[in-house]
Image (spheres, grey):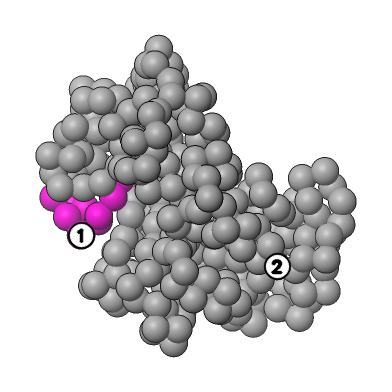
Amino acid sequence: MSFVKRIVLAGLGSMALVAGYAAVSALSNVFYKKGYTAEEIARLIVVAHRGGAALGPENTLLAIERGITSGADMVEIDIHQTSDGKVVVCHDESIDRTTNGRGLIRDLTFEEIRGFNIVDKDGKVTDQKIPTLDEVLDLIDGRVKLLVEIKRTADIYQGIEQQLVDAIAAHNASSWVVAQSFNDSVLEKLHAISPDLRLEKLWVFKLRGVDDAVDGWVNDYSYEKYNYVSSFNFYYRSVTDSLIDEIHRHGKEVKIWTVGSPSDTPHLPVDGIITDHPDLWRTK
């Protein structure tokens, strides 16, 4: 059992400990120089976060299309499951923030959800609807890669991992779809169902001096444990050159989330960036 978990189980100020680690980790690269050369940017994998949330209402077909045309290498989306088993694309587990409706996705039918419209970041109702995973796969059709995030709420969505794998097969998309999650059980299920599916592990920060990291919970950080995972994707403020080098030595890529413009992003030897502003990293 790790040092941090012993403290947690003993109840000896674990919340204060983790909060302290978080504060330090969040400032890990605050003094790093910022900005990237054109050559460095060209080598990066640019991922359009929530389709390209600065380019259109997040996780909509409009934003995804704009993310693609901006020159992004990948588009990232989030999936949930309706009460009647339809896989839909939305960041939150409810539709309250992103539409003119209300309710948890798991409590609403697909027909009910499609009765509402997406609202933009200014609160204006648009003509966009919450799309299905199938609609996104049809739209992308291999033009770029798709990074699909399954949330921790997957525990309440029966079979959502299998539905993702089935959708990938139905759209002949195995060469261009990747899955990521903070949730280890999601990653383990996906790997068991489809061993060839590329998987990426989301982290918030790595605890210094111990074999643990935070992914929403304090979790064991082991390269052997995640030997089937291709990339570790960290909050951009929490990583350092030395951690990135260590991850690379273990044969994994590193992506950082969620960054703004190149001029505002700490200069780090990462493989990819996840951003609402893919247009600022790619020009066509």
SS for dot 1: loop
SS for dot 2: loop
Mark closest to the chain's N terminus, 2 or 1: 2
Q: Nearer the viewer, residue 240 or 102?
A: 240
Specify the quadrant that holds the N terminus: top left
Q: How many marks?
A: 2
Residue at 44%, 72% in the rendered image: 142
Residue at 20%, 39% in the rendered image: 247
Q: Relative to 123, does residue 62 appear above or below in the rendering?
A: below
Q: Relative to 90, does residue 112 appear above or below in the rendering?
A: below
- Asked if residue 119 shows in the view, the reply is yes
Q: Which residues are magenta?
A: 224-233
Q: Label 2 is placed on what type of residue?
A: Ile
Relative image position of residue 99 (x, y in whole percent) = 79, 58
Q: Label 1 is placed on what type of residue?
A: Tyr
The residue beneath circle 1 is: 228
**Tag of residue 130:** 2
Q: Is residue 235 left or right of residue 130?
A: left
**Tag of residue 155:** none
The picture quadrant where one finds residue 177 is bottom left
Q: Nearer the viewer, residue 130 or 184?
A: 130
Task: Please say if the residues under marks 2 and 1 sit with CB atoms less than 8 Å apart.
Answer: no
Residue at 40%, 28% in the rendered image: 36
